[in-house]
């Protein structure tokens, strides 16, 4: 019963938050000690060794009929339609501890796993995380964002430089820019449509509200930060500039009529950056994850949350977590003394977290993967 644009606005706000929570709860620093503790008695009685299970899952997405290349790359034989493919790694009891970025549905499962392991045995730079709680406060506007390929187009610093260069050429250049991206200068920032905020006395840094005169209760709140679509303007303009440059280069070299969105080198660069988009990408992001884990652990122990596979992991890894929190200067470390750097647990990145003595299990589609 809701219009598609309304649903879109809700998804744009909440999907990044769901993604961040999913990363915090699905990217777990498993250890050999934990895998040994959680091994089910049934597996142990059968003589089954320690294993981590790999599986591929496809999720249906909308069809991109206007681009045949995208349509071909997203076709999934599992879904018999357009989908994205994700590879998950889980422990013997089913706890997901690692996942791949989302790939187009046509990507081979084995190739995705090989790509995930391409970084090799690398550990997180825990030395730089010392006292990050007080030294480098967390800013959700900048630090709660994982990399996506669109980041390459939304470079506000480059955009500002371009606007400054245009401004030096006179007001006519700015007007041309606004018309090219379908935006309006509303006296605050570039907007998709005229808002009248300036006439209402609202600036880009201020908020104003309308109150019920009888009760004094705020019934409507206006904020320039909430209504202007500067990100859309940046995206449209940067896409236009970059595509024009690519098109010009292609015409010179190959006289090619169609413009490629991605070159092999650019695609490789984006994939490598996507691999690094997890809670271990920085000390601030890791601190956010560990504090969430500690608060959840406390709720589980107090009986306020029903215990599950995650609660057992948090209990088993509490000592390692408290050491890291103390190293980072978090108050959630409690009375845990700050360890030396050598006393910190190592945090292998990506598939390096799977101990060498632990086998990899999966369906026939992953046969022979351990030999690769």
Image (cartoon, rainbow, N blue to C red):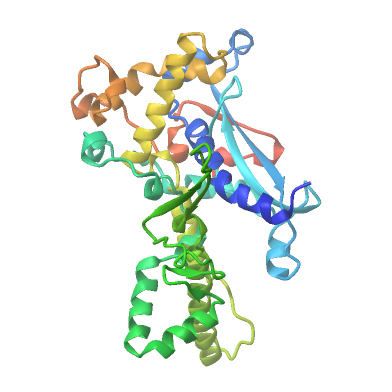
Given the current orientation, which residue lies at the most extreme front position?
214
Given the current orientation, which residue lies at the most extreme right position?
80
Q: Nearer the viewer, residue 141 or 343?
A: 141
- The answer to whether residue 265 of the structure is visible from this angle is no
- Toward which corner of the image does residue 66 lie, by quadrant? bottom right
- The answer to whether residue 190 of the structure is visible from this angle is yes
Q: Position of residue 279 (x, y in %)?
A: 42, 39
Residue drawn where x is 53% and y is 39% of the image: 214
Q: Position of residue 197 (x, y in %)?
A: 48, 64
Q: Nearer the viewer, residue 174 or 360?
A: 174
Q: Nearer the viewer, residue 178 or 113?
A: 178
Is 1 located above or below residue 168 in the figure?
Answer: above
Is 341 located above or below residue 77 in the figure?
Answer: above
Left or right, 318 with reference to 264: left
Residue drawn where x is 23% and y is 28% of the image: 329
Left or right, 66 with reference to 366: right
Q: Nearer the viewer, residue 208 or 9?
A: 208
Q: Position of residue 3 (x, y in %)?
A: 74, 53
Given the current orientation, which residue lies at the most extreme left position?
340
Q: Position of residue 293 (x, y in %)?
A: 43, 25
Quadrant of the image for the C terminus? top right
Q: Say how many tags the image has.
A: 0
Left or right, 157 with reference to 150: left
Left or right, 162 with reference to 240: left
- Toward which corner of the image does residue 247 lie, by quadrant? bottom right
Is 253 located above or below residue 19 in the figure?
Answer: below
Residue drawn where x is 50% and y is 15% of the image: 312
- Toward which corner of the image does residue 288 lie, by quadrant? top left
Is 114 located above or below residue 233 in the figure?
Answer: above
């Amino acid at each position: 019963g809701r219009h598609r644009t309304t649903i879109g606005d809700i998804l744009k706000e909440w999907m990044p938050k769901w993604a961040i929570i999913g990363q915090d709860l699905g990217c777990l620093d498993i250890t050999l000690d934990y895998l040994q503790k959680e091994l089910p008695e049934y597996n142990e009685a059968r003589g089954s060794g320690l294993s981590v299970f790999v599986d591929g899952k496809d999720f249906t997405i909308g069809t991109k009929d206007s681009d045949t290349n995208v349509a071909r790359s997203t076709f999934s034989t599992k879904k018999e339609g357009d989908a994205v493919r994700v590879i998950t790694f889980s422990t013997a009891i089913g706890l997901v501890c690692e996942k791949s970025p989302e790939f187009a549905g046509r990507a081979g499962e084995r190739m995705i796993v090989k790509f995930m392991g391409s970084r090799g045995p690398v550990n997180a730079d825990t030395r730089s995380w010392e006292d990050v709680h007080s030294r480098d406060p967390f800013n959700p506007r900048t630090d709660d964002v994982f990399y996506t390929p669109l980041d390459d187009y939304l470079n506000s610093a480059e955009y500002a430089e371009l606007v400054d260069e245009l401004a030096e050429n006179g007001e006519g250049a700015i007007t041309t820019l606004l018309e090219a991206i379908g935006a309006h200068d509303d006296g605050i920032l570039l907007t998709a449509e005229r808002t009248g905020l300036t006439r209402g006395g609202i600036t880009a840094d201020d908020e104003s509200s309308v109150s019920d005169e009888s009760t004094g209760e705020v019934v409507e709140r206006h904020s320039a930060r909430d209504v202007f679509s500067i990100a859309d303007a940046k995206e449209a303009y940067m896409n236009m500039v970059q595509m024009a440059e690519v098109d010009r280069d292609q015409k010179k070299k190959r006289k090619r009529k169609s413009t490629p969105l991605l070159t092999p080198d650019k695609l490789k660069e984006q994939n490598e950056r996507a691999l690094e988009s997890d809670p271990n990408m920085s000390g601030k992001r890791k601190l956010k994850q560990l504090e969430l884990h500690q608060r959840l652990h406390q709720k589980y122990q107090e009986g306020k949350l029903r215990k599950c596979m995650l609660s057992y992991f948090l209990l088993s890894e509490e000592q390692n977590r408290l050491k890291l929190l103390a190293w980072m200067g978090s108050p959630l470390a409690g009375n845990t003394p700050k360890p030396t750097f050598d006393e910190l647990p190592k945090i292998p990145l990506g598939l390096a977290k799977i101990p060498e003595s632990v086998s990899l299990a999966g369906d026939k589609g992953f046969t022979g993967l351990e030999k690769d």
